[in-house]
Image (tube, coloured by chain):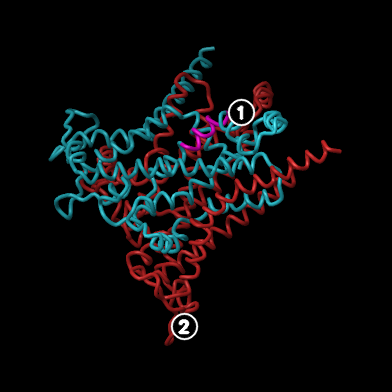
Amino acid sequence: MPAKRQASRVRRQRLRAAWLFLIPMLVVLAAVAGWPLMRTIWFSFTDASFANISEYGLVGFENYLVYDNGAWYGVLADPTWWNAVWNTLFFTVVSVGMETVLGLIIALTLNAQFRGRGWVRAATLIPWAVPTIVSAKMWGWMLHDQFGIINEMLMGLGLIAEPLNWTANADLSMWAVIMVDVWKTTPFMALLTLAALQMLPSDCYEAAKVDGIHPVRVFFKVTLPLILPALMVAIIFRVLDALRVFDVIYVLTSNSADTMSMSVYARQQLVEFQDVGYGSAASTVLFLIIALLTISYLYLGRKQIGGEA
Amino acid sequence: MNRKLLKKIAAKTGFAILLAGILLFTVFPFYYAIVTSFKSGSELFDVTWWVSAFDFSNYASVIGDGSFVGSIWNSVLVSFATVIIAMAFGLTAAYALGRVQFRGRSAVLMIVLGVSMFPQVAVLSGLFEVIRALDLYNNPLALIFSYTIFTLPFTVWILTTFMRQLPKELEEAAIVDGASPMTTLFKVFIPLMWPAMATTGLLAFIAAWNEFLFALTFTLTDDQRTVPVAIALLTGGSQYELPWGNLMAASVIVTVPLVLLVLIFQRRIVSGLTAGAVKG
């Protein structure tokens, strides 16, 4: 009996300690994430300005959508916003798609046994470590319209007749942004894919080899289905990241409408146009899009885990 | 027999070309930045593939510029402080989440995961107000404070994953000896957690070193900036031409430490990235 009582005393003590340990973290998260998010949502219903953020009036849904004098106003009626939404979606789908394929190729290569593999793996990590700002500047220089090495290479190969203005040309600038992002984040995809590949059992490959099945067929019938769950997690992470893209676009092409993403749009309204109300409304819409995606992912993920158990 | 040999050679060559392509793709942009950083004047406008002469004038002018060195110090301060804060809050939280069964545990984990999905711009105006209220605007302390929004969630997440893998017997001995949870954490777990702490610390350091949006918005003057902002806003003598030589020298200066960290700790970083994503 006393032993049992002592055990429950220890349990209670541990429970109390657990919450004591958690509270500081929860307070910090509330201060840097929870409260600011609530305030952003609140501001989206006001006419607050950046210069004087403490004085404002409530305006209801005016920042989102309002019908006034025969025309619609607000974020949801702004063609620039919808252009930013389209740009962000295009950027996300194309760059994450390319990163997945390239990452898979690099991972399959690194999964083979060869001398110096550790070094190659370390080298593939370099783009991941380079600050986004630096990679945008480095590529900005390589893509320079007059002195850039990319134009020089393409002209040397006879692919283009005259230098292209990658970052200013409306048809090319989004591809320039995608190029930089693919360079910077493919290593992340490659490493996560590689980790999944290295967890695969080797016996089914030996069986396939004995049966003389073509490696390409083995890849599509065995490897890909087995690494698909891990690959999906990596893709979701990258998609959520790509939807909030800011740095690379802001540095490479500034506030150009051809490449403007939702984050760039929201920040421009907030800081440059000083319109905290309107910018907060755009930020809130972006938050809702990402929250919806996250929740549906968590829901689907939980279902999958439940199915396996 | 001969055909088989030929096939083998072809496969080997193909693989070598693939490897060379991967290496070129990943390393070349940084290599080219280094090449450019050693050029000055009109040399910059000739495309060359190798360093022909080591001209350090770009480095001299970047380091001679007091505000850039100041930015480096700000970045160092902000990154180290961010790591220490993330560790202090992350370790205690990870102990609770990884070792104690309690109601609400998965809810807390969901909150942590949810915060890591936040778009930074969604908290920008609210955070700006908080920073104004704390009188931290245009102060690196504002960055240390705001960076916890992205460092704390993944620190907690990864440390919890590692903490959970440690054997149960460790703790039982401590409990039998009547050690308090705080003593257990410090005497039993932290000594075993060094590898995991090094991993998360590195990831937090790199994330803080590279952050741009908050640093751009919450600082105003040159002397309070961190390096990413300093590089993004670096301008030349004339309004129309960017000083590419200086830019590349500055880029190399801020990237070399990170590249060295990555080369030395690549195993730790890879294990951290995969623990954060795959097991999540």
Give the residue number, with chain letter if any, for mark 1.
A214
Q: Do labels 2 and 1 share a chain?
A: yes
Q: How far apart are marks 2 and 1 (CA)?
A: 63 Å
For residue A37, side relative to residue B241 (left or right):
right
Of B44 and B251, nearer the camera is: B251
Mark found first going from the N terminus, 2 or 1: 2
Is label 2 or label 1 in front? 2
Give the residue number, with chain letter if any, for mark 2.
A67
Q: Residue furthest left?
A: B42
Main secondary structure of the magenta stretch: helix
Q: Which chain does the numbered disc 1 sit on?
A: A
Of B165 and A234, nearer the camera is: B165
Q: Which residue is drawn at 20% across and 33% down?
A: B38
Instruction: Inspect the image, locate mark 2, and give the three-letter code of the amino acid beneath it.
Output: Tyr
Q: What stretch is highlighted in magenta?
A: B192-201
Q: Residue at x 41, y 44 (%)?
A: B208
Question: Vertically, is B269 above or below B69?
Answer: above
Q: Which chain does the numbered disc 2 sit on?
A: A
The tint of chain B in the picture is: cyan
The chain coloured red in the image: A
